Image (cartoon, rainbow, N blue to C red):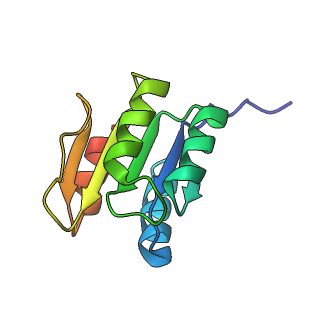
């Protein structure tokens, strides 16, 4: 038996643009997160319930019925202690839940990782 690895925290990345989602996921994986990628809020909502991540990064504009702001509120109801980062190229349309962070695109790696708390 070798030394046990510390459990990596789980992060969810919600972004309907494949390339942006991959980039965000890679950044977080490099800073030791286990990353679940979701392309819409409905899939992310199921993952939030099933996996209890410690971080969620979501774009505001998503395909489907729920946008990133609604998803942020849902995520906080599921887990009040989760770090929530919402990103967009546009101004925030409605208030985010308390404690959530809003970043405008382009999001720089250093900013994202500082907010992710790793």
- In the rendered view, tell whether residue 16 sits above or below residue 10: below
- x then y, percent, for residue 44: 55, 49
- x then y, percent, for residue 31: 45, 50
Q: Tell me which residue sits at (13%, 59%) in the image.
A: 91
In the rendered image, which quarter contains the N terminus? Answer: top right
Q: Nearer the viewer, residue 98 or 107?
A: 98
- x then y, percent, for residue 14: 47, 57
Q: Tell me which residue sits at (36%, 40%) in the image.
A: 72
Drawn side of residue 87 relative to residue 9, left or right: left
Which of the 4 image quadrants contains residue 8? top right
Q: Nearer the viewer, residue 69 or 111?
A: 69
Drawn side of residue 102 relative to residue 14, left or right: left
Which of the 4 image quadrants contains residue 6? top right
- In the rendered view, tell whether residue 96 sits above or below residue 111: above
In the rendered image, which quarter contains the C terminus? Answer: top left
- x then y, percent, for residue 93: 17, 53
- In the image as oriented, which residue stretches furthest toward the front? 65
Drawn side of residue 25 relative to residue 118, left or right: right
Q: Nearer the viewer, residue 18 or 73?
A: 73
- In the rendered view, tell whether residue 83 sits above or below residue 38: above
- In the image as oriented, which residue stretches furthest toward the top? 80
Q: Tell me which residue sits at (24%, 63%) in the image.
A: 107
- In the image as oriented, which residue stretches furthest toward the right? 1
Q: Is residue 46 visible?
A: yes
Count up the numbered dots.
0
Q: Is residue 35 visible?
A: no
- In the image as oriented, which residue stretches furthest toward the bottom? 19
């Amino acid at each position: 038996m070798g030394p046990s690895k510390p459990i990596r925290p789980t992060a969810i990345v919600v972004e309907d643009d494949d390339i942006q989602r991959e980039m965000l996921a890679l950044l977080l994986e490099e800073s030791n997160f286990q990353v679940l990628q979701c392309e819409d809020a409905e899939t992310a909502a199921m993952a939030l319930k099933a996996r209890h991540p410690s971080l969620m990064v979501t774009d505001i504009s998503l395909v489907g019925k729920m946008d990133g702001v609604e998803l942020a509120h849902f995520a906080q109801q599921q887990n009040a202690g989760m770090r929530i980062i919402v990103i967009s190229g546009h101004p925030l349309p409605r208030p985010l839940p308390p404690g959530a962070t809003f970043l405008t695109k382009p999001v720089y790696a250093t900013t994202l990782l500082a907010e992710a708390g790793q």
